[in-house]
Amino acid sequence: MSQAIPIFYYHSVGGAPPQTLALTVFRRHLESLRAHNFTLITVADLVQGRRPHDGRPCAVLAFDDGLLDNYENVFPLLLEFGFRATFYVVPGYDGVTRWVNPRNGRWSDVARQSYTISFASMQKNQRRELVAHGMEIGCHSFTHRRLTRVPVRELAHETRGARVFLEDELGAAVQTFCYPNGAFGRREMDAVRSAGFVAACGTMPGYYRAHGNPYALRRFLVENPLFFEEVLGGRAFHPAAWPLSWVRWRNAQVACR
C-alpha cells in the first residue's frame, strides 16, 4: 500500500495571536517530522513525481499569503532542520500591511477601527532568498481576491499575470497555484491550467492522490499537535482522530480568508 502523503498548510507562524500558530507548536511539528524520518518536498516535487528513492516517507509544508513572519520565523527553522517547503505569495501585497481584529479574528487589507494587530508582507528580496535556498515560491493570485467572484476578464491577471510577474522577479519557474480562500470551481481550475500552472491547492482536508485532479489538491490545516501526529501516520480520517481536529474547523473559516 502506498504512503498517504499529507500536504500541511499554514498562514501566520510566530506572530501575534489569535490568528497565528505559536512558534513552539510549529517547532514540534518539525521535530515530529524529523523523528519519523520524513523527507520534506515541495508541492511541485510532489505532483511531478520528484520523490526520494530511499523509501523514506514524504510530506509537504505549504505557507499561504506570503506573510513576513514566514520569512522571519519559519525560514530559519526550515534551514535548521534541513527541510524544504512551498510558500504561496501574493505579489499585490508588496508594501501592504494586513490587519486582524483580535475580537473576531477577521482580516482586513486596510487599516480599520478595531483591527489592531498588524501583519507585514514579504517583499521580492525575501522571496528571492527563499528560492536561493531551495524553497518553492508558488502563486496565491495577484491580489488575493476570491476567484469565484472575479469577472472572467480579470482572471488572467490573477493567474497568468501573477505567474509572469513572479517568474520575472525570481528568474525561476512558478509552477503551482493556491486558490485564495480555497474557493474554486471548474472556471477557476480552467483559468489556472490555462495560465501554465501544473497544479493548484484548495483547503479541503485529504491526502495527496497520484491519480486525483492536480488542480484540486487537498491539504490539512493542523494546529493541534496530537492531530498532526494522526495525519502524519495516515490516520486523519480514523474516528478516533476526529475529536483532535476541532481546532482546524474552528479556525478554518477565518484563517483561510
Image (cartoon, rainbow, N blue to C red):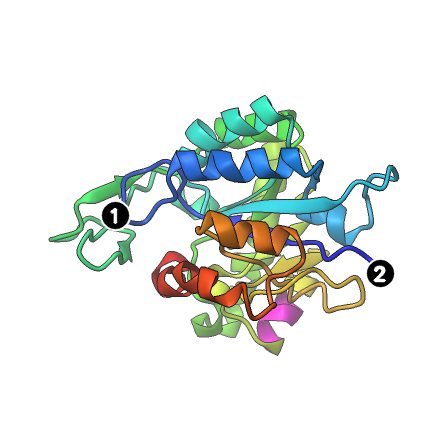
Residue 84 seen by the camera: no
The quarter of the picture where the N terminus appears is bottom right
In the rendered image, residue 15, in percent from the top left (x then y), is placed at 33, 37
Residue 214: which disc? none
Q: Which residue is mark 1?
A: 99
Q: Which residue is mark 2?
A: 1
Q: Main secondary structure of the magenta part?
A: helix
- State the residue lying farthest toward the left: 113
Q: Is residue 186 left or right of residue 64?
A: right
The quarter of the picture where the C terminus appears is bottom left
Label 1 CA crowd tier, 10 Å (few <14, some 14–19, many 20+) = many
Asked if the magenta segment contains residue 100, the reply would be no
Residue located 48% across and 73% down the image: 148
From this view, report whether residue 121 is shown above or below residue 241: above
From this view, report whether residue 41 is shown above or below residue 212: above
- Tag 2, which secondary structure? loop
Residue 12 seen by the camera: yes
Q: Earlier in the sequence, mark 2 or mark 1?
A: 2
Residue located 75% across and 44% down the image: 57
Front tag of 2 and 1: 2
Residue located 58% across and 41% down the image: 166
**In this view of the protein, which residue sits in the foreground, 67 or 229?**
229
- State the residue lying farthest toward the bottom: 186
Q: How many marks?
A: 2
**In this view of the protein, which residue sits in the foreground, 239 or 142?**
239
Task: Give, as a three-letter code, the residue at label 1.
Answer: Trp
Label 2 CA crowd tier, 10 Å (few <14, some 14–19, many 20+) = few
**In this view of the protein, which residue sits in the foreground, 47 or 173?**
47
- The region drawn magenta spans 187-191
In the rendered image, residue 83, in percent from the top left (x then y), is placed at 64, 31
Asked whether disc 2 touches disc 1, contact meaning CB atoms under 8 Å apart, the reply is no
Tell me the distance, in whole angstroms, between the alpha carbons under discs 2 and 1: 45 Å
